[in-house]
Image (cartoon, helix red, strand yellow):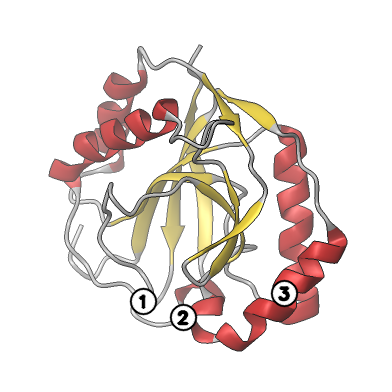
Amino acid sequence: MTARSPHRYGVFLRPDPHTCTMLAQLHLTMKQQFGLVSSAAFPPHATLAGNIHCGVTEAELVEVLDRLLADAASFTVYNSGIVRLGSALVFDVHHLPDGTPNTGMTDLVAAVHKALAPLSLPHEDHLTRPFSMDRFRAHLSVASHELALRPDLADEISAFLDVLAPAPPPRFTADTISLFRFHSHDWEAKWWKDMTWEHLRSWHPS
């Protein structure tokens, strides 16, 4: 793949079906009420590794993930409700009930990034930045990228969500990890406006 490749890849943790359905409904509400489309452009997910500009073939990428995830174990994820994360509004799934980071999540994220680092090419896509474990917070997006461009909407959307009071399951089992391919004609612009995606493969830790 060249430096101008229109493809990016994401390794995502899929929540339980009830949470996925609630997220899909919230994303549609954000689109219909506020015109925000970036969260709705993705499948419901918690990012393990995202916006990967891959320097190897898809088959090689899958082979690396096959090796990494062959002995992966499932773990419990706790949903602490909606919080602000930078400019975004998200469900916090980073922490245990006692407020400490969920090491099941952070260890998995660190392992995925370590495995993919040799395969990844540098890039400067719009409203993205290099991964940092220090900055990482596991989350499920409700309203995301556009709020960096429309911060004036954040308080209104937050109040809207307070009234709506979405209540997903307080916990779910992390037992489905999926690889997606994404396409945009211009990753240096508002890529979420034309981005399409395809599910490539899932793994199921036991």
Q: Is residue 194 visible?
A: no
Name the amino acid type tagged 1: His
Residue 157, numbered circle: 3
User: Closer to the camera, 16 or 9?
Assistant: 16
Mark toward the start of the polypeptide (2 vs 3): 3
| Residue at image coords 43%, 70% | 184
Tell me: residue 71, above or below residue 176.
above
Tell me: residue 95, above or below residue 159.
above
Q: Is mark 1 in CB contact (under 8 Å) with mark 2?
A: yes
User: Closer to the camera, 199 or 78?
Assistant: 78
- Percent x, y of residue 127: 38, 74
| Residue at image coords 26%, 53% | 132
Q: Is residue 88 visible?
A: yes
Residue on which the image places disc 1: 126
Q: Residues within 10 Å of mark 1 (few under 14, many from 20)?
A: some
Residue on which the image places disc 2: 190
User: Closer to the camera, 123 or 106?
Assistant: 106
| Residue at image coords 40%, 82% | 189
Name the amino acid type tagged 2: Lys
Label 2: element kind:
loop
Residue ranking furthest to the left: 118
Q: Picture quarter containing residue 167? A: top right
Mark toward the start of the polypeptide (1 vs 2): 1
